[in-house]
Image (cartoon, rainbow, N blue to C red):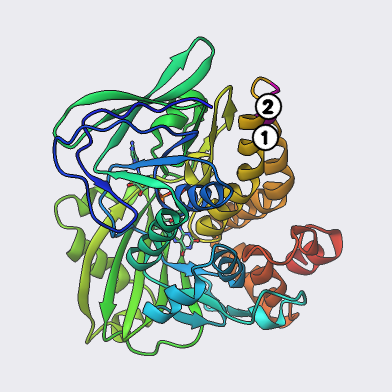
């Protein structure tokens, strides 16, 4: 197996949690290089390291770090965390179990979907809301315990080409030094604005081009046991109880609305939240506990998710919209699909084992992609959206839909003429 040559390590966290010192010299070999140590990269690193593969991750951030996210996971997210061996540790440190999702449509109708009533046995009856600072930090630590190495503060700026194949990453240290890291397999798990996807993925431009403003607030009145989504004709908000008196509050607006937020994200955030029915009242005593983080536009899609010597997972492969996204679960699932194929590619180089990954992703995600887009575009027609929400609630179908968007009920439970006709007529 090949070598990743690492000169001049600047910020390397060792297995005991200590960090390498600035300017220390070192040479490290790796079978797999991973750009990005978010849920996708860390889960892949953990799975591969457990199987005895030598893994080197690079991340431009230093963990623990925050991430603009609504921080909601269905029971399927809990299943993945359990399989990765971190569920207990994460829940001990924080987070809150949630029972489902409530959707408030633009003209007053609403639905509540409960995981426990989705009609298929979930891993458990509750999902998990937990800050990404805690979740992602726990995953990185677990990957390190399994034997993976992470270089923090190191940014991937391109891929190394070995003829038609990818042979590693070009990275830049915090101090600006540029160098090559080489390995037989390179994984792009570097998120929505993935450098690896830009080079190998034939990245498709966004269509919805929505932006999000996300904060942690205390003092939000009326929090229940489900996450909330409030939809208007000009965007939506998510309110997700995180436990410990905190709520994750996210505002999502079309790109045409973001101009007035420039340089004044916080007043814009509160002013827009106040436009949603009943929300201003509930936020009257709210206090910002974590600053408003801004991200967007979303909806990025890599037409190719593999190249010789490389593959993409998580948001680097695709991300549509947070409304139905379950992007954390999708990143975990991508890592689950990729791990055996990466091992096969390492064991039998040149046999094209990685190419199978695209087919398996399609089989795993196609139904969900269709549903996400159907809901994402239905939101642009407020009257239709409102009537559909009312029918789903009245006909007892909301639980099934929440199970499908939560990735533990198969999409065919929704993508069939009987279900669809009950939503539309
Ligand atoms: C507003 C919003 C709300 C969301 N809410 C939810 C939700 O409630 N539930 C849910 O499941 N999903 C949600 N998502 C989606 C979810 O955040 C993502 O799908 C998920 O984080 C994808 O994981 P990932 O590992 O692919 O990427 P990321 O979590 O983005 O991790 C990528 C990592 O790569 C690093 N990185 C980036 N570029 C480079 C580079 N060039 N070099 C080195 N490192 C790099 C970053 O520092 C980061 O650590 C939401 C998304 C948004 C935008």
Q: Which of the pair 344/243 is nearer the observer?
A: 344
Badge 1 is on which residue?
344
Q: Which of the pair 254/249 is nearer the observer?
A: 249
Indicate whether residue 362 is drawn in magenta: no
Q: Is residue 31 above or below residue 224?
A: above
Secondary structure at badge 2 equals loop
Please tell me the numbered disc located at residue 348: 2
The answer to which image quadrant residue 276 occupies is bottom left
- Position of the C terminus, as image quadrant, is bottom right
Query: How far is the residue under mark 1 from the one under mark 2?
Result: 6 Å
**CB under 8 Å between discs 1 and 2:** yes
- Position of the N terminus, as image quadrant, is top right
Indicate whether residue 353 is drawn in magenta: yes
| Residue bounds of the magenta highlight | 351-355
Secondary structure at badge 1 equals helix
Coordinates of residue 381 in the picture (x, y in percent):
56, 57
Coordinates of residue 295 in the picture (x, y in percent):
32, 51
Please indicate whether residue 113 sits to the left or right of residue 8 in the image.
Answer: right
Coordinates of residue 120 in the picture (x, y in percent):
77, 74
Q: Is residue 342 above or below residue 179?
A: below
């Amino acid at each position: 197996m090949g070598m990743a040559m690492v000169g001049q390590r600047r910020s390397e966290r060792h297995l005991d949690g200590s960090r390498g010192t600035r300017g220390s010299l070192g040479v490290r070999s790796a079978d797999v290089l991973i750009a990005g140590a978010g849920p996708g990269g860390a889960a892949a690193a953990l799975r591969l390291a457990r199987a005895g593969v030598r893994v080197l991750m690079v991340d431009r951030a230093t963990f623990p770090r925050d991430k603009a996210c609504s921080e909601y996971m269905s029971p399927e997210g809990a299943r993945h965390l359990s399989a990765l061996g971190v569920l207990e540790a994460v829940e001990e440190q924080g987070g809150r179990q949630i029972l489902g999702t409530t959707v408030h449509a633009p003209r007053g109708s609403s639905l509540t979907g409960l995981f426990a009533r989705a009609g298929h046995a979930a891993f458990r009856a509750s999902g998990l809301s937990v800050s990404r600072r805690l979740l992602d930090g726990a995953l990185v630590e677990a990957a390190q315990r399994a034997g993976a190495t992470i270089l923090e503060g190191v940014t991937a700026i391109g891929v190394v080409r070995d003829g038609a194949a990818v042979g590693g990453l070009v990275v830049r240290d915090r101090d600006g030094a540029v160098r090559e890291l080489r390995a037989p397999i390179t994984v792009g798990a570097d998120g929505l604005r993935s450098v690896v996807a830009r080079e190998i993925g034939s990245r498709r431009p966004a269509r919805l081009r929505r932006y999000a403003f996300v904060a942690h607030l205390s003092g939000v009145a009326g929090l229940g046991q489900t996450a909330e989504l409030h939809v208007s004709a000009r965007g939506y908000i998510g309110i997700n109880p995180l436990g410990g008196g905190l709520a994750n509050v996210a505002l999502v607006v079309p790109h045409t609305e973001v101009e007035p937020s420039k340089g004044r994200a916080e007043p814009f955030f509160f002013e827009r939240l106040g436009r949603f029915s009943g929300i201003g009242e509930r936020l009257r005593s709210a206090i910002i506990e974590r600053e408003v983080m801004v991200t967007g536009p979303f909806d990025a899609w890599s037409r190719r998710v593999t190249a010789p010597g490389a593959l993409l997972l998580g948001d680097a492969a695709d991300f549509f919209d947070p409304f139905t996204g379950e992007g954390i679960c999708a990143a975990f699932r991508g890592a689950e699909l990729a791990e055996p194929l990466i091992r096969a590619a390492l064991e039998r180089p040149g046999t094209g084992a990685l190419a199978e990954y695209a087919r398996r992703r399609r089989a795993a995600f196609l139904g969900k992609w269709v549903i996400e887009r159907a809901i994402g575009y239905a939101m642009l027609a407020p009257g239709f959206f409102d009537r559909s929400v009312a029918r789903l609630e009245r006909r007892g179908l909301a639980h099934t839909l929440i199970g499908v968007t939560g990735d533990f009920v198969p999409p065919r439970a929704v993508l069939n003429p009987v279900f669809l006709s009950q939503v539309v007529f």
